[in-house]
Image (tube, rainbow, N blue to C red):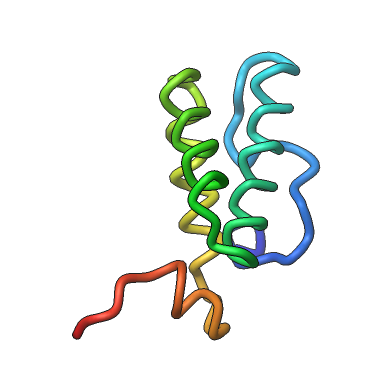
Amino acid sequence: SKRLSYQKKPLRISLLNLEGLEMNRLAVDAFSYILKYAQKSSGPIAQDLVALGLKYAPLRDEIYVQLCKQTTPNNTETTAKYGTLEND
């Protein structure tokens, strides 16, 4: 499904059915962290994303699905470098 395939543009709504406007806004924020991380691979951005999931339990599944979305199918060099683990 295209809904679960890589995209360059920010989300407008959550991928999962979250309750309330606040959770949906936070889900959109989480996706923007993922997009920024894929471009810059900055530690503070990853920490912000993890903190969001720790603070708001309903977002944990959403963040997981968003990460899956951004790595399936995405064969860009950035994903190979920052989005997956490489075998040495």
Q: Residue at x 29, y 79 (%)?
A: 86
Image point (69%, 14%), residue name: 20
Residue 88: x, y in percent?
19, 85
Q: Position of residue 42 (x, y in %)?
A: 54, 56
Instruction: Say if 79 sits above or below 21 in the image.
Output: below
Q: Is residue 79 above or below residue 16?
A: below
Q: Residue at x 60, y 29 (%)?
A: 17
| Side of 80 relative to 20 (left or right) | left
Considering depth in this image, is 35 or 59 the residue closer to the camera?
Answer: 35
Q: Quadrant of the N terminus?
A: bottom right
Seen in the picture, residue 74 relative to 65 is either above or below; the reply is: below
For residue 77, what is the image quadrant? bottom right
How many numbered discs?
A: 0
Q: Is residue 70 left or right of residue 60?
A: right
User: Which x, y percent locates residue 48?
Assistant: 54, 36
**Residue farthest to the left, as pictured:** 88
Q: Residue at x 59, y 52 (%)?
A: 34
- The one of 35 and 17 positioned closer to us in this rendering: 35
Q: Is residue 78 left or right of residue 2?
A: left
| Front-most of residues 68 and 45 | 45
The x and y percentages for residue 50 are 45, 36
